[in-house]
Structure formats: C-alpha cells, structure tokens
Amino acid sequence: MSKILFKLMIENKLKREEQIMKLFNCYSMVFFSLFSGSVYAASFNCDHARTQTEQAICEHRAVNDADVKMATTYNIIKRLVPMGTRGVIQDEQVKWLQLRDQCGNSRNCLIEVYKMRQQKLDMYMDRVYRQGPF
C-alpha cells in the first residue's frame, strides 16, 4: 500500500512541477516582451500618439509599462481561448479602451484603469492555467 501511495505522491509532484514550468515559461515570455528593445508602448507607436491619453501613456513610464504588460497579456490570452471567449475578451477590450480614453492625460486615472484591466486579464490567464488552453 505504501508503494502505491508513494507513487501517487511522486506523480502529483511531477504534475505540479510541470504546471509551474508552464506558468514560468508564460511569464518569461511576458517579461522578455516587456523589456525587449522598443521605447514605444506595445499597443501603438508613440511617434504617432494622437490623443491626450496616448501622449500621457508615452510620457509616463509607469503607465507605458502597464500598457506593455496589458497588451502582451491580452495578445497571449487571445491565442489561448476559443473563438466565443475570444470575442467576449475583444468586446471587453474595446469597452475598456473607451474607458481608458476618458482619462485624458491623468496619470493616476490611467494607472487605475490599467490595473483594473490587468486584473481582469489575469483572471482569464488563471483560468487557462487551471484548465489548459481551450
């Protein structure tokens, strides 16, 4: 009986380690995407920033970093979920962009709306981690 129990414990440990490695690999992709070469926000070229909001994103490093992280997470999630969920996430993104644009050049407002969106995207990512890609 103890051999079976030992075997199950080893299998569970291996599964946990595999899940941790998948999580590490995904976050590694996000991390390296954040710090690779470009001085632009991930979702647009700052040389072509048209609105007050886009200019504020480019001017404030913390907001720019949040934009890069959010855009990277969003693009990863879009590739990991089925079409129906993808459509929901895309619709949410459009509504969120409208909300974000209401911040104008307010750094604090932008930080808060990015934090809110990142939390929502992290929930989707957590679902992918728990259930696997759809």
Image (cartoon, rainbow, N blue to C red):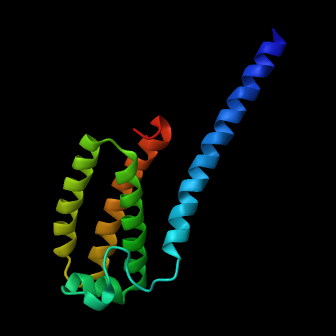
Residue name at image x 19 percent, y 87 percent: 50
Residue name at image x 49 percent, y 42 percent: 129
Which residue occupies the foreground of this view, 111 or 64?
64
Q: Quadrant of residue 29?
A: bottom right
Left of 52 or right of it: where is 40?
Answer: right
Residue 126 drawn above or below residue 70? above
Outermost residue on the top side: it is 1
Residue 77 drawn above or below residue 100? above
Q: Position of residue 93 (x, y in %)?
A: 24, 59
Residue 97 drawn above or below residue 119? below
Q: Position of residue 107 (x, y in %)?
A: 30, 81
Q: Quadrant of residue 102?
A: bottom left
Residue 101 drawn above or below residue 9? below
Left of 50 or right of it: where is 65?
Answer: right
Quadrant containing the C terminus is top left
Which residue occupies the foreground of this view, 108 or 121?
121
Residue name at image x 21 percent, y 67 percent: 97
Q: Position of residue 38 (x, y in %)?
A: 46, 83
Quadrant containing the N terminus is top right
Left of 118 or right of it: where is 1?
Answer: right
Give the number of callouts. 0
Residue name at image x 34 percent, y 86 percent: 58
Outermost residue on the right side: it is 3
